[in-house]
Image: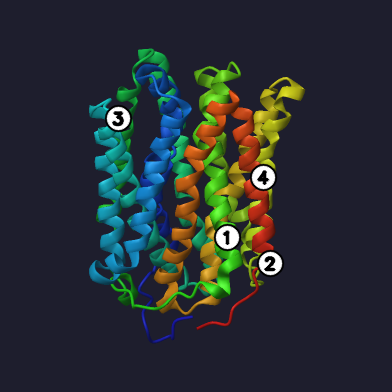
Amino acid sequence: MNPPDSPNPYPHPARLILILSLAPTVGLGIGRFAYALVLPDMRDSLVWSYSAAGFMNTINAAGYLVGALFASQMIRRFGLAASVRWGTLGCVLSLALCAISGNFFVLSFARLLAGLAAAAGFVGGGALAATIAQSRPERANFLLSLFYAGPGIGIVASGLIAPYVLQAFGPGSWWIVWWALTLLAVAMTIPLLLAPLGEGAAAGRATAAKFAIAPVVFYLAAYFMFGAGYIAYMTFMIAYVRDSGGGAAAQSAFWSLIGLSAFVTPWVWRHVLALDRGGIATAIILGTNAIGAAMPILAPILGNSPVLLAASALVFGVAFFSVVGSTTAFVRFNYAPAAWPSAIAGLTISFGIGQTLGPIVVGAITDAMGSLSYALNVSAAMLALGAVLSAFQRKLLKS
């Protein structure tokens, strides 16, 4: 707690973190994940294979990886608030680029830019959210989880827009969807630009600190598996729903259920996130994520039941948004505040490598086997392995 005679630099931490969550809303919820909603129409219109479609998320993930590699240096030079704002603006630009061209190389560059910018905003935003949350230690885990609900806002918003725009304008209207998402991102960026994120001594600077790999090797491996595993589900499940006969309403409902589940995660997982026992919290949440991803495996047996797909979206979503939150809680429990940006960046790099490899691998599996079911099975298995690996991570001494 702050001493009685020192004013709290963050008098309204929940409100400030909710505004800060607009960075991952734009960078991840819209900039990365909305691609899955437009993918089926883009693939049909631009005559892409599943490997080419997967490459678009691979190049996005590669940009995210590079952005994570340089995030700590960027934060030290420009500050946390500037990294968040410029990163979000870069994501808005990338959305506009997706709308203006069907050229494969232009779209690849746009997806690369989206990844680079989202990483800067996410690493800076995560460190800043942890700093703000720490101003209320008794509510820190709950406050921190608000930041990671951000992508859910973007997923719900895009899920309510994209399928119906595609339905209204017909085949080949994917570029109109990208324009609609660009306008949505612009509106969401304005509060982020106006919020007093630079207030407080810790908001504008970050201290250099080393991040050692050896003590957290199991945790890094688990986060790698999460990165590789979740991306197949989030890239190809809308295509799976469409191929199963789901129209615009079904696609919108499925995607929105994933996003809506983010809003209950602060309450569902608050006690789990408070566990200061190494990687146990991540193991529990990641295991739940694996169960949600595995549910579509039963769909052919049960006749592609809408109830089963809805349950899959809810279970996957309620865990998905808290896996990243659990890693930030792990960092907060096991590292000194000066090391938070470096530690978050280090974990993000491992995650980034996994999600870089994931989309193109599962795309190739789908092309080779002729069915999305095989890729989704691999996805669930990788998430389950990640849960097992994180359970082996021991608690560290604070540096």
Q: CA distance from mark 1 to mark 3?
A: 32 Å
The dot on residue 381 is 4
Circles 4 and 2 in contact, beta carbons < 8 Å:
no
How far across and down, in percent of the image, does residue 389 sit? 66, 60
Q: Which residue is mark 3?
A: 104
Whichever of labels 3 and 2 marks the residue nearer the N terminus, that label is 3
Q: CA distance from mark 1 to mark 4?
A: 14 Å
Q: Residue at x 51, y 26 (%)?
A: 252
Q: Residue at x 76, y 24 (%)?
A: 301
Whichever of labels 1 and 4 marks the residue nearer the N terminus, that label is 1
Q: CA distance from mark 2 to mark 1?
A: 11 Å
Q: Which residue is mark 2?
A: 392
**Among the 4 quarters of the image, the one containing residue 113:** top left
| Image: 237 above or below 315 | above
SS class, disc 3: helix
SS class, disc 4: helix
| Image: 374 above or below 78 | above
Q: Mark 3: which amino acid?
A: Phe
Q: CA distance from mark 4 to mark 3?
A: 31 Å
Q: Residue at x 61, y 46 (%)?
A: 318
Q: CA distance from mark 3 to mark 2?
A: 42 Å
Whichever of labels 4 and 2 marks the residue nearer the N terminus, that label is 4
How far across and down, in percent of the image, does residue 1 sit? 49, 80
Q: Mark 2: which amino acid?
A: Phe
